[in-house]
Image (cartoon, rainbow, N blue to C red):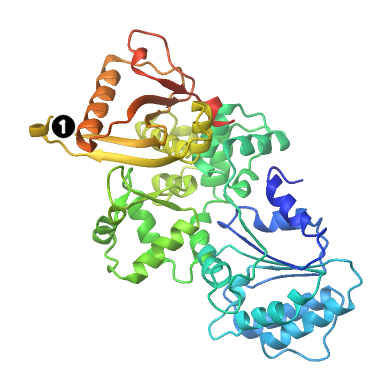
């Protein structure tokens, strides 16, 4: 049974009702649930279903394609020598089908596109010259190599240009969707534990699926990540190897970004990784962004050329902090509870969760309908101008002339707004106002787990957003 994905399911199922053919592309990060979504949408009933082979040659890809034709009830009279011939055989299978709608699902399409392959030309010809002229075909193509899907299918400049009827970018679950999944699985986790799980696994349903009933979150993390046969122990390496044919430089970029909380400029990345400043670096950064591993943002008041790249994937951040160097303790996570390293990570990971729930934050503020721009911001000390030097991880700059200056603080209890916190907040407001010259009203906003304790310092805040608000 599938959790969430209502809009995606509606779109896929609607195609069954139309009197025209559909060409649908589904893409997104590996393990995000693309294949499961398509299978659930069509109740596992396909006229033809096939998945490409990981790192195999063209002849092997063709062999398994023919095997899939046979499994679908059609045995070709000849063995296809190329993809044009293979798609001709697929046409024959479709002609013989008596189903009202012929649902064709080709998974991991990028793996089929081997070097020197005529795959894309054959796919273009199949759709443009034949399938699109019918009214009974639903062609769904899918791949985890998001950048490949964007360049070769979605933004194709050749024969597939503007040919898709629908595209689905499947994104990570929100906290609310993860909570629904946890309840469906019968797990007894409270919201703080679900939040902590999100800080480790992100919104990737596949990872959550390994959680077991009767075990605490700490026990589950050790079993899933640190035990001798932990199912996710090698996931990081496989994650990049399955998406990128030469993953080493991508891993260098992720490792560098994992060391800096606020992210890095292009120049800083080049210095940290040794990767040359060429178009190839631009391509790699674009690919990582398209996979939702990183975000690119411009600091408030800065130009686009000063963009900052920041690691956003919770699972990758956790791996780089605690697993990359290897751990021999099978109870590592239980034994690390309340250590300085874990407490520091929790603060950082909570910020990532907040940055991935901007719409929920805006809803809590009552400004969902207000056009807003999301920024981070920092300035260096300049005492000649009365600037102390500040860093702000989240600014919501609203078109109603308000800036929500957001402080994100993870706490296991109600957050205590101290005199030092108030002083720091006022300094940031001062630095932001002086440095940028903004005339917008600045609303200090605290995002924390359980709210705040009431005292004489809480009046410095205009709004308080809690963990429960992030679940809305």
| Count of picture labels | 1
Q: Quadrant of the N terminus?
A: top right
Q: Quadrant of residue 132?
A: bottom right
Q: Nearer the viewer, residue 374 or 65?
A: 374
Q: Quadrant of the C terminus?
A: top right
Q: Is residue 234 visible?
A: no
- Residue ID at (39%, 45%): 321
Extreme residue in the left direction: 384
Q: Nearer the viewer, residue 223 or 422?
A: 422
- As drawn, 154 above or below 353: below
Q: Nearer the viewer, residue 418 or 123?
A: 123
Position of residue 139 measured from the top left corner of the image (x, y, whole percent): 73, 68
Left or right of residue 386, residue 448 in this image: right
- Residue ID at (55%, 56%): 29
Position of residue 72 measured from the top left corner of the image (x, y, whole percent): 84, 73
Extreme residue in the right direction: 98
- Residue ID at (39%, 55%): 254
Left or right of residue 77, residue 313 in this image: left
Position of residue 343 measured from the top left corner of the image (x, y, whole percent): 39, 31
Position of residue 351 measured from the top left corner of the image (x, y, whole percent): 42, 36
Q: Is residue 8 visible?
A: yes
- As drawn, 101 above or below 114: above
- Give the structural element (helix, strand or loop) at label 1: loop
Check disc 1: other Cα within 10 Å, few if <14, some if 14-19, many if 20+: some
The residue pinned by badge 1 equals 387
- Residue ID at (42%, 62%): 286
């Amino acid at each position: 049974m599938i959790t969430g994905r209502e809009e995606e399911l509606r779109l896929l199922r609607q195609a069954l009702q139309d009197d025209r053919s559909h060409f649908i592309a589904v893409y997104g990060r590996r393990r995000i649930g693309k294949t499961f979504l398509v299978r659930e949408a069509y109740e596992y009933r396909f006229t033809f279903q096939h998945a490409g082979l990981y790192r195999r040659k063209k002849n092997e890809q063709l062999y398994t394609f023919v095997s899939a034709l046979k499994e679908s009830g059609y045995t070709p009279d000849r063995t296809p020598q190329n993809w044009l011939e293979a798609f001709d055989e697929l046409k024959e299978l479709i002609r013989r089908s008596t189903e009202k709608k012929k649902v064709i699902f080709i998974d991991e399409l990028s793996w089929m596109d081997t070097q020197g392959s005529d795959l894309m030309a054959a796919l273009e010809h199949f759709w443009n010259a034949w399938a699109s002229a019918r009214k009974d075909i639903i062609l769904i193509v899918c791949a985890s190599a998001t950048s490949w899907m964007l360049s070769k299918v979605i933004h194709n400049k050749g024969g597939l240009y503007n040919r898709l009827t629908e595209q689905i970018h499947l994104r990570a679950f929100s906290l609310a969707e993860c909570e629904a999944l946890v309840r469906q699985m019968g797990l007894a986790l409270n919201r703080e534990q679900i939040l902590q799980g999100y800080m480790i696994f992100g919104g990737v349903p596949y990872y959550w699926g390994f959680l077991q009933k009767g075990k605490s979150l700490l026990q589950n993390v050790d079993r899933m990540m640190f035990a001798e046969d932990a199912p996710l122990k090698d996931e990081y390496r496989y994650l990049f190897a399955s998406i990128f044919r030469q993953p080493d430089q991508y891993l260098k970029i992720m490792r560098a970004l994992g060391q800096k909380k606020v992210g890095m400029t292009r120049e800083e990345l080049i210095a940290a990784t040794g990767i040359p400043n060429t178009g190839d670096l631009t391509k790699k950064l674009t690919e990582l962004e398209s996979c939702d591993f990183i975000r690119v943002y411009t600091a408030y008041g800065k130009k686009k050329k000063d963009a900052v790249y920041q690691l956003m994937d919770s699972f990758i951040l956790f791996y780089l902090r605690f697993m990359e160097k290897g751990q021999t303790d099978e109870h590592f996570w239980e034994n690390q509870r309340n250590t300085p390293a874990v407490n520091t990570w929790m603060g950082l990971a909570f910020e990532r969760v907040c940055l991935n729930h901007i719409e929920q934050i805006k809803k809590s503020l009552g400004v969902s309908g207000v056009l807003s721009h999301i920024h981070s911001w920092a300035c260096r000390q300049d005492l000649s101008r009365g600037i102390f030097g500040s860093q702000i991880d989240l600014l919501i700059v609203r078109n109603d002339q308000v800036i929500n200056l957001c402080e994100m603080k993870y706490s296991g209890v109600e957050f205590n707004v101290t005199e030092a916190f108030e002083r720091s907040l006022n300094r940031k407001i001062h630095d932001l106002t002086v440095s940028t010259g903004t005339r917008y009203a600045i609303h200090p906003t605290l995002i924390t787990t359980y709210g705040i304790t009431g005292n004489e310092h809480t009046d410095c805040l205009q709004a308080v957003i809690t963990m429960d608000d992030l679940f809305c």
